[in-house]
Amino acid sequence: MTDWSDPEALDCSDEDTFDALLDRAETREKGNYFEFFAEGDELSHDPGLRLSQHGSEGWMGQTLNHDPAYWRSDAARERGFDGVPVHPDYLLACVMGITVEDLSEKGGYFLGRTDVEFHRPAYPGTELAVTSRVVDTRTSSSRPTYGIVTWETEGRDRETGDRLVSYERTNMIPRREPAATDGGGSMADGDGVDPETPDLPETLLAPDGARFEDFSTALERAEAEDAAVAYRHERGRTMDDQLVAGLPLSTLNTARQHHNRDEMADSPSGDIVAYGDVTRSIALAHARSDEATYRERRFEDERFHSFVTLGDTIYGFTRVLDCDPDAGPDRAGAVTFEHVAFNQDSTPVYSGRRTALIQRQQ
Ligand SMILES: CC(C)(COP(=O)(O)OP(=O)(O)OC[C@H]1O[C@@H](n2cnc3c(N)ncnc32)[C@H](O)[C@@H]1OP(=O)(O)O)[C@@H](O)C(=O)NCCC(=O)NCCSC(=O)C[C@](C)(O)C(=O)O
């Protein structure tokens, strides 16, 4: 009788024999299909991650986030932090990265996120505890092989229990069994989906500077002239391997979309795509390079309109929606922006509403 535990029993010398062997072997699956999720379910995510200065600097350097308060202790102290905090984009991406194995590793695309709130700054060395609750599941009416799931997620400091960031996100999630729908429509092939076109006036103004007063003066001017405050940012960043695969992996994001070209070849995008948080962080970095940010506060209605693949270049466009002089400390006022990330073909790939505290003139 053949001894199947004998290491020699596995013949790797013949490709066809090995291929036939693979066909017979069961695949130990990772991640969860749509059917796994039920409204009200709570999940505590096991992967652990300690926020690090190295990770934060790696994220910021690659995405062009150069705000000195996240790099230098004198600038951090001057801005009222207890030390050099990790960057909020890195914090958010890490909290979401940890959830991927349980929530979205099966391969559905990240469609949008809202109610993103930063509750307190996070510092290197913080170990994260991340939990999620299923708030909604529904069948996709246009795509029978997918469902749409929304979760509420909270990232806390594992030691103190302090809430650091919370948000609600929505993904397409593959179904184990296709639903009986009309099956109409096909997934976008990367040509892009037009987001709602903002009804903007003919004249677009840019603020004269980077301070709160520059934004509020520009808004007042725009109102008087029937114009809008909306402008482009000059920098662009081309998506390379480090951005598309390296950064999500550094946040423990196991979504195949970002690092498995073999699997993604047959997917709607046809290739690996950038982690939504990387795309967004680049566009926000472009915007922040034209403003004197004091603190990030919250994001609403974030949407990912179209795929970003290797070689695409991400640019930024910003519209100023509101200025509130009373919403911050003496030295800053709150500005609400709408940011759009777009690619080299001017196709919008991300949009989101952001409220940040912007420093006043000194
Ligand atoms: C996915 C694509 C192909 C669908 O393109 P489409 O033309 O099929 O789009 P659609 O028809 O507008 O939307 C499909 C369905 O989604 C719904 N929907 C749409 N948006 C929302 C939203 N915000 N909230 C709630 N529902 C939404 C929408 O209502 C519709 O429902 P229906 O099938 O019943 O008619 C297209 O939208 C696209 O290319 N988007 C970009 C996706 C992307 O690249 N995301 C970031 C990268 S993936 C990622 O980061 C992964 C991550 C973070 O690691 C990880 O989750 O694990």
Image (cartoon, helix red, strand yellow):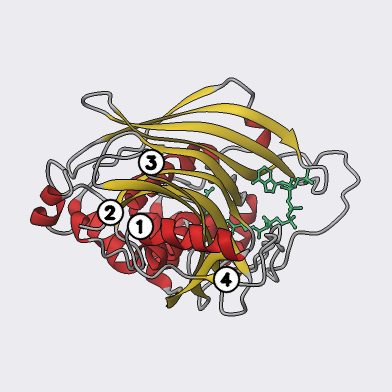
**Kind of residue at disc 3:** Val
- Amino acid type indicated by mark 1: Glu
Residue wearing tag 2: 360
Please say if the residues under marks 1 and 3 sit with CB atoms less than 8 Å apart: no
Real-space CA distance between mark 4 and mark 2, rounded to the nearest whole angstrom:
23 Å
Q: Is residue 122 above or below residue 110?
A: above
Q: Which residue is mark 1?
A: 213
Residue 145 screen position, x and y as percent = 76, 46
Which residue type does callout 4 highlight?
Answer: Leu
For this view, does 158 lie left or right of residue 271?
left
Indicate which disc, 4 or 2, sits on the residue closer to the N terminus. 4
**Closest to the observer: 121 or 184?**
121
| Circle 1 crowding by C-alpha within 10 Å: few under 14, some 14–19, many from 20 | many
Say what secondary structure mark 4 lies in. strand
Q: Residue at x 37, y 44 (%)?
A: 325
List the residue tagged with mark 3: 95
Q: What residue occupies the far front of the structure in this picture?
A: 224
Mark 3 or mark 1, which is nearer the start of the sequence? 3
Label 1 sits on a secondary structure element that is helix
Mark 3 or mark 4, earlier in chain = 3
Q: Closer to the camera: disc 1 or disc 3? A: 1
Q: Is residue 82 left or right of residue 141?
A: left
Could you tell me which residue is drawn at 59 percent across and 47 percent down?
Answer: 112
Question: Given this view, does label 3 or label 4 mark the residue nearer the observer?
Answer: 4
- Which amino acid lies under the numbered mark 2 shown in the image of this protein? Arg
Q: Residue furthest top?
A: 40
Pick whichever of labels 1 and 4 is earlier in the sequence. 4
- Camera-nearest residue between 286 and 293: 293
Residue 28 visible in the current orientation: no
Q: Earlier in the sequence, mark 2 or mark 3?
A: 3
On screen, residue 163 versus residue 320, left or right, reads: left
